[in-house]
Amino acid sequence: QVQLVESGGGLVQAGGSLRLSCAASGRTFSRYIMGWFRQAPGKERELIATINWSGRSTYYAGSIKGRFTISRDNAKNTVYLQMNSLKPEDTAVYYCAADLDGYGRYQYWGQGTQVTVSS
């Protein structure tokens, strides 16, 4: 069983920054691919970033590329999402998720953290 707890969301003005954290339980965190998703009101959930076990391979959706950075600290069982140059359209609930087998199925999810960007 894996438990994921996000933190770091909040209200920020356009152009500002936030850093989301996702703390994971479990001794094998370093083996998981980790992903960040977001879901805006009335929209489908969107995969925005992933990071492999070592942190050397990452993926970013086009909507956030160049503004957000995913990273991980396996010693702390934590994955981060640094969000810069935030836009009102980044407003959403942000979720972290763990992919245990590498097939993109993301078996475990956090509860989500709200990010609101005001114009």
Image (cartoon, rainbow, N blue to C red):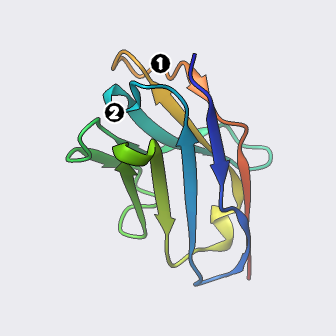
Report the front residue among 18 and 49.
18
Q: Which amino acid does label 2 sit on?
A: Ser
Question: With 81 as the anchor, is 56 left or right in this view?
Answer: left
Q: In this view, does 82 lie above or below 70?
A: below
Report the front residue among 43 and 52.
52
Q: Residue at x 56, y 44 (%)?
A: 23
Q: Mark 2 points at which residue?
A: 30
Q: Which residue is drawn at 47% across and 18% down?
A: 105
Q: Residue 79: image x %, image y %?
A: 46, 48
Q: Name the residue under label 1.
A: 105
Q: Is residue 100 above or below residue 79?
A: above
Identify the mark at residue 37; answer none if there is no mark: none
> How many C-alpha atoms fall within 10 Å of the one at disc 1: few (<14), some, or many (≥20)?
few
> How many C-alpha atoms fall within 10 Å of the one at disc 2: few (<14), some, or many (≥20)?
some
Name the quadrant containing residue 17. Answer: bottom right
Q: In this view, does 35 lie above or below 80?
A: above
Q: In this view, does 59 lie above or below 32?
A: below
Q: What residue type is labelled 1?
A: Arg
Q: Which residue is drawn at 74% across and 83% down?
A: 119
Q: Which one is earlier in the sequence, the residue at label 1 or at label 2?
A: 2
Question: With 26 as the anchor, is 116 left or right in this view?
Answer: right
Q: Residue 59: image x %, image y %?
A: 32, 46
In 3D space, how far apart are the residues under numbered discs 1 and 2 (Cα atoms)? 17 Å
Q: Quadrant of the N terminus?
A: top right
Q: Residue 64: image x %, image y %?
A: 45, 61
Q: Which residue is drawn at 40% across and 55% down?
A: 70
Q: What element carries label 1?
A: loop
